[in-house]
Image (cartoon, rainbow, N blue to C red):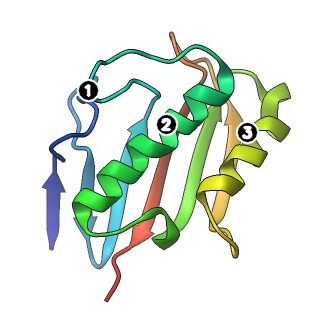
Amino acid sequence: MRKAIMVEGAAKAAGHYSHAVIANGFVYVSGQGPADPVTSIVPDGFAAQVRQTFRNVQIILQGAGADLKDAVKVNAYLSDVTRFHEFNAIYQEFLPSPPPARTTVGSQLVGIQVEIDCIAVLPT
């Protein structure tokens, strides 16, 4: 079964996609950026953008019935890969040990410094 969801209180989608899709006990969260879901303002600074992006992913996971602790795979896209260590430190604030599998790549992002998507397992 496949169920596409849009989560109330999450940042508005920037294109034609669902916030997440639930299928076979997993939640697949679309790539999220750092825009505040209430004001649509993107914070200044790399660290602030990373934290807001994780909060945005968390809002969607919670709307689907999961949480960041349920993440099994995270994909992170950084506009500047030289900031990997700073990103990694913030990542550890949001994802407890043992951490999920992760891929981090450099990417040409427009107007933002980070985008994150993930796959999480729905708690039983």
Residue kind at label 3, given as amino acid type? Phe
Quadrant of the image occupied by residue 31: top left
Q: Residue 8 appears at what percent x and percent y?
A: 15, 44
Which residue is located at x 31 percent, y 18 percent? 40
Question: Label 3 belongs to which residue?
Answer: 87
The residue that label 2 is drawn on is: 53
Task: Using the numbered discs, state the Cα–Cα distance from disc 3 to disc 1 in whole angstroms.
Answer: 24 Å
In percent of width and height, residue 83 lies at 80, 29
Q: Nearer the viewer, residue 110 or 44?
A: 44
Q: Residue at x 45, y 17 (%)?
A: 42
Q: Are marks 2 and 1 in contact (CB under 8 Å)?
A: no
Local packing at callout 2 (Cα closer than 10 Å; few below 14, some 14-19, many 20+) is many
Q: Nearer the viewer, mark 2 or mark 1?
A: 1
Structural distance between the alpha carbons of marks 2 and 1: 13 Å
The answer to whether residue 45 is above or below residue 54 is above
The quarter of the displayed image where residue 21 is located: bottom left
Gap between marks 3 and 2 measured at Cα = 11 Å
Name the residue located 53 percent from the left edge and 17 percent from the top edge.
Answer: 112
Q: How many marks?
A: 3
Tell me where residue 77 appears, x and y as whole percent.
61, 34
Question: Is 71 placed above or below 39 here?
Answer: below
Label 1, secondary structure: give it: loop
> In terms of secondary structure, where does tag 3 sit?
helix
Say which of 16 and 54 sits in front: 54
Q: Which numbered disc, 2 or 1, marks the residue that appears first in the sequence?
A: 1
Q: Amino acid at mark 1?
A: Val
